[in-house]
Image (spheres, grey):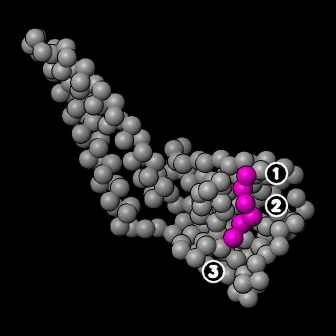
Amino acid sequence: MSDNPPLLTDVHFEQTADRLKIVLPVKRNIPLTILYTVLVFIWLAMMVGGIIYTVQIAFSGERYAFVFTIMLVVLLFVFYRFGRYLLRQWAHYIASREIVFINKEMLILRRPVSIFGNTDAYDMEHVTPFYMSEKPASPAFDYGYRHFYFGEGLSSPSANELVRYLNRLFFPNHEPDPDDEDE
């Protein structure tokens, strides 16, 4: 990795011999952040209430207590799994920055929230060259049949420059589209 990173506002590059770290700003979506925060509090209250109710039923001494407790435990497990998904979405919207780690083998997207947060890793063998998506207007790449977007908080010129830099560094044989050159 010898190419010097571009000077972009609000973007921090750290380059070592084996990887590139890019810290990007995140564009906050306040309505969704508030919605997911409220949903997390509701889920947490319902989970605690469900555990308390399950314990009360289990030790009630009624003849149906065992079967009903098993049904509640299964329901709580399903509700717990839903909560894990909900917490992942909440962490996505509450994050203040996005970190991209790239080397020749892996591309890692991380949205840190304290010690928690979302981390997704992709094998570079299956990552397509980077491009600018139209909606949302951000850098993107394809992994298999799925599209992944990052850096939505960047301005359009900064995002275009980042895409050109990443393609120059990790996909040197990629021919850019003529439409992208005009922008």
Q: For the residues marked 3 and 2, what is the alpha-carbon distance in whole angstroms? A: 21 Å
Q: Is residue 153 visible?
A: no
Compared across the picture, whether 122 is left or right of 85 comes to right
Pick out the residue farthest to the left: 62
Q: Earlier in the sequence, mark 2 or mark 1?
A: 1
Q: In the image, which disc is placed on residue 52? A: none
Query: Does the magenta segment cover residue 127?
Result: yes
Query: Which residue in the structure is indicated by mark 3?
Result: 156
Location of residue 70 with respect to 18 vertically, above or below: above
Q: Secondary structure at mark 2?
A: helix
Mark 3 touching mark 2, by CB under 8 A?
A: no
Label 3 residue SS: helix
Residue occupying image coordinates x 69% and y 70%: 131
Residue type at the position of mark 2: Phe
Measured from the top left, where is residue 57 in percent x and y?
15, 20
Which numbered circle lies on residue 104? 1
Specify the segment rendered in magenta.
Answer: 126-131
Q: Nearer the viewer, residue 145 or 76?
A: 145
Position of residue 67 in the picture relative to residue 150 (left or right): left
Residue most extreme to the right: 2
Residue 93: horizontal and vertical position, in percent? Answer: 45, 59
Q: Is residue 150 left or right of residue 129?
A: left
Q: Residues within 10 Å of mark 2 (few under 14, many from 20)?
A: some
Q: Disc 3 or disc 2, which is closer to the eye?
A: 2
Residue type at mark 3 is Ser
The quadrant of the image that shows the C terminus is bottom right
The mark found on residue 170 in the picture is 2
How far is the residue under mark 3 from the one under mark 1? 26 Å
- Image quadrant holding the N terminus, namely bottom right
